[in-house]
Image: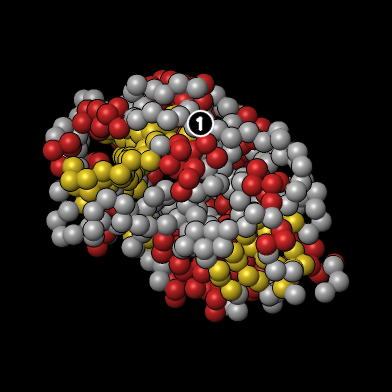
Amino acid sequence: MLDAVVVGAGPNGLTAAVELARRGFSVAVFEAADTVGGGARTEELTLPGFRHDPCSAVHPLGIGSPVFSTMPLARYGLEWLHPPLPMAHPFDDGTAAVLSRSVSETAASLGPRDAGTYRRLVAPFLGKWDSLARDFMSLPSTALPRDPLTLARFGLAGLPPSTWLLNRFREERARALFAGLVAHVIAPLGGIGTSAVGLVFALAAHAGGWPMPRGGSQSVSDALAGYLRDLGGAVHTGFEIKRLDDLPPARAYVFDTSPTALARIARLGRAYDGYKYGAAAFKVDYALSGPVPWTAEAPRRAGTVQIGPRARDIDAALQLATGGRAPRTPFLITAQPSLVDPGRAPEGKHVFWAYGHVPAGWGGNLTDAVERQIERFAPGFRDLVLARATAGPPELAARNPNYVGGDIACGAASGLQLLLRPKLSLFPYATAHPAVFLCSSATPPGPGVHGMSGHNAAKAVWRHLRRAPS
């Protein structure tokens, strides 16, 4: 009998498996798709030689992950590549604000009236990323804070709605850039705890940057799987699980799935009926004949470019998407992987992706609206398009069952569910079944390729295994 079986080979499932294997437990992972990765895969979606990331591409929380930093992932092929700028946010006047690894460069791009405000906002946390990230991304039930004073200070700054924090800035440049950071979790700006989201992304840039893995996000998943195999763990792909009986006997079962799928497979009844899924993404991957012709200079050097010139534009797009309507002027997050990794495309060519937010399950086509927004800040963009691959909510959900209704966060990151997911509990990784656990991004600390949900869940599992008879 195995000690643990993990269902789902996304970064959280693989991390949970690695953490258990590192402690001497026998582990096997079962994945329905033909390759490991979940939301961290790389595929030729458009033309031969153009390697795209179907979901995540940029990983500030990956390079800054407390658990990844304890693993020898470089030995298994993971190499982080840093663009000259982590992120840029262009405006209609041809300029751009930037999120740089340098606090001074970031502050200067926001203008003289807000430069000091930004420095004061981030100053208490500079140089403290390692302890803050570990404390913020863990729970008291999984690890006691290493730096409780900094964590408390972060809580005071981060718990209010981001709309409160935006009011500290006097100019639109700073408000727009920070609003865009918050919008990465696809939730309206006025929700509790949304200030923390923006702060985490900003501090991650200053601490470790917003890098991309050489070769694409698949490199993260492949490194985790390679490390797991060397630890004695097994990985089985192309193995769809419909019920617990489909799995080999084990002392514990760990699910890197949505709560909905877990309840169905483990027959937990209505245990997660109160869990809410959020708005969806509409994503377009491009094969380009050249680099994106941004009007502003800074986006030409940025791995990530946010497109939504004003905070109120960003919030309006989010409000529409979460309220059931597709925005005509979407807020976009775009990524330029081949800027730092030319091997992702044939010589002289580029890969590029963009996504906007739409209602869950929306079946329309946002491509024209997406390209109008890009052309607004990069005239001539359409002339460079060799091929495009679009994925709306139905396609995203079909590609990854964890993306229920196209929700790439595996659950709404709004209201109390931003902080307390999948339900109000001191032990969110445990379920009504004593041997079944949940480790997906539906559990704290939530979305992102960081493995911390898997790490935290693994702690609950190994405590169970040490108590249970072998």
Identify residue type, mark 1. Answer: Ala
Residue 33 left/right relative to 327: right
Which quadrant holds residue 442? top right
Callout 1 crowding tier (Cα within 10 Å): few <14, some 14–19, many ≥20:
many
Task: Tell me the quarter of the image containing the N terminus.
Answer: bottom right
Residue 351 left/right relative to 325: left
233 lies above or below 109: below
Camera-side residue of 135 and 426: 426
Task: Tell me how the rendering is colored.
Answer: secondary structure
Residue at 72 percent across and 61 percent down: it is 245
Residue 303 left/right relative to 451: left
Residue 19 left/right relative to 316: right
Can residue 15 be seen by looking at this rendering?
no
Could you tell me residue 377's position as x and y percent? Answer: 22, 31
Camera-side residue of 351 and 135: 351
Could you tell me residue 116's position as x and y percent? Answer: 41, 33
Can residue 391 be seen by looking at this rendering?
yes
* Residue underneath mark 1: 360
Could you tell me residue 35's position as x and y percent? Answer: 46, 63
Residue at 39 percent across and 22 percent down: it is 327
Task: Tell me the quarter of the image containing the C terminus.
Answer: bottom right
Could you tell me residue 278's position as x and y percent? Answer: 55, 33
